[in-house]
Amino acid sequence: MTSARKLYYGWIVVAVTFLTLLISSGIRTAPSVIIKPLEAEFQWSRASISLAVAFSLFAYGFGGPLGGGFVDRFGPKRVMLAGLALCTIGLIPLLALQELWQLHILWGIVVGVGTGVIANVLGSTITIRWFNKYRGIVLGLLGAAGATGQLIFVPALIAIQSSSGWRSVIGVMAAAAGVALIPTLMFMRDRPQDMGLQPLGELTVAQRTDTRKTTLREALRTRDFWLLAFSFFICGYTTNGLIGTHLLPHTLEHGFVEADISYALALMGLMNIFGTLASGWLSDRYDNRRLLAMYYGFRGVSLAALPFVLEMRGMLLFSIIYGLDWIATVPPTVNLTAQRFGRGSLGLLYGWIFCSHMIGAGIASYAGGFFRDQLGDYHLIFLSAALLGLVAAGLSLGISTSGNLKPATA
């Protein structure tokens, strides 16, 4: 009876991974808080600062397949420790920032790679290794780490920046990355066999019989890989790149107060947690293609309305609708990748699909700053994101779940 009640160690691994992803997400929220202070202190343009964020998002994206390969070779624990160490090493010198190139190298490359190798690919690998049961829920939970990071860190970082300046924001995030090394070192384990355990739950018939592996070269020849990659490209464009980087500067330039916006962003993060957990539950039960189409459709509609939101009630409504599907796209995208190409290829192929997500994010980050400098506002770029969201909804419905590879030219 005692052993039956003993906590499965995989849940401790999930908790450590959640904390690591939460810290990584908190680090990634910092640019939106410090863009305007950097402009004021150094007289740098919005586009030039956004370029550093774009570099970081690109590095973050390419860190996905890089981290996936390292996880397969060295295990999640070493990769998490290396990623957190890179974040700390990249953030500390930013406290003495004086030149724009320093921002591009330290934030754009070092922090970008550090956060990238511990990004969503890590969560999917942990889920597959430790759980046969509850996979959708665990994926949703680890996906919600990003939303929780926003919920916790954005209001806190806004308050810190207002009272102590942008360098204090960087210092807090460097300290958080350093502290996260401790539980990772003490409690993280690579696989259940290291603890004399087996993955939790019995394999389903589909999981037991799905031994397929698809090489990257084979996947690149299929239409479905490109549908998944381009729809996730749009996901990155419409989330991390545009809203994650530019929503706060946009609202401050349209008369909103920092304290009020911090509440709206916290609400968005809270809705994101609910949305992502619900998406994980739904993705175990319903057609993942239709779920994706619904998520992208609602996102497109909410972004189309954003330029016309001029008062707090509308901003809170936007936070609720948009927040519910920010990271809700992750569980269905992971599931569709596994269903289409085999679970044995999930780490590699999802790593590259996630890379396309961050390429979209990087493009939107720089484009947002560029068009803001050229036009004086973000309206055009928000409308472009709305249109792309509707395109992604259509692309999602065209994805096949068949294991038979269909060439892209067919």
Image (tube, helix red, strand yellow):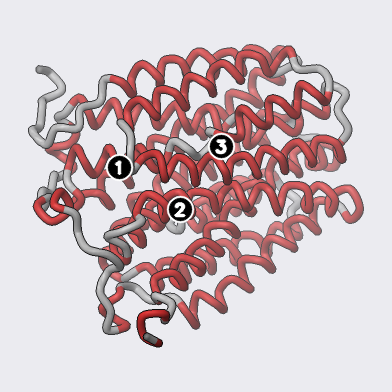
For the residue pair 310 and 53, the one nearer the viewer reads as 310
At 36% from the left edge and 62% from the top edge, which residue is drawn?
Answer: 126
Tell me the CA gap for discs 3 and 2. 13 Å
What residue does disc 3 label? 240
Tell me the CA gap for discs 2 and 1. 17 Å
What residue does disc 1 label? 335
Q: In this rendering, would 28 be left or right of 340?
A: right
Q: Nearer the viewer, mark 3 or mark 1?
A: 1
Answer with mark 3 or mark 2, whichever residue precedes in sequence.
2
Q: Position of residue 336 (x, y in %)?
A: 27, 37
10 Å crowding of disc 2: few (<14), some (14-19), many (20+): many
For the residue pair 223 and 143, the one nearer the viewer reads as 143
For the residue pair 330 and 239, the one nearer the viewer reads as 330
| Residue type highlighted by circle 1 | Asn
| Residue type highlighted by circle 3 | Asn
What residue does disc 2 label? 119
| Residue type highlighted by circle 2 | Ala
Q: In this rendering, would 229 be left or right of 381?
A: left
| Residue 271, picture quadrant | top right
In the image, farthest residue toward the front: 1
* Residue 78 in view here: no
At 77% from the left edge and 51% from the top edge, which residue is drawn?
Answer: 157
10 Å crowding of disc 1: few (<14), some (14-19), many (20+): many
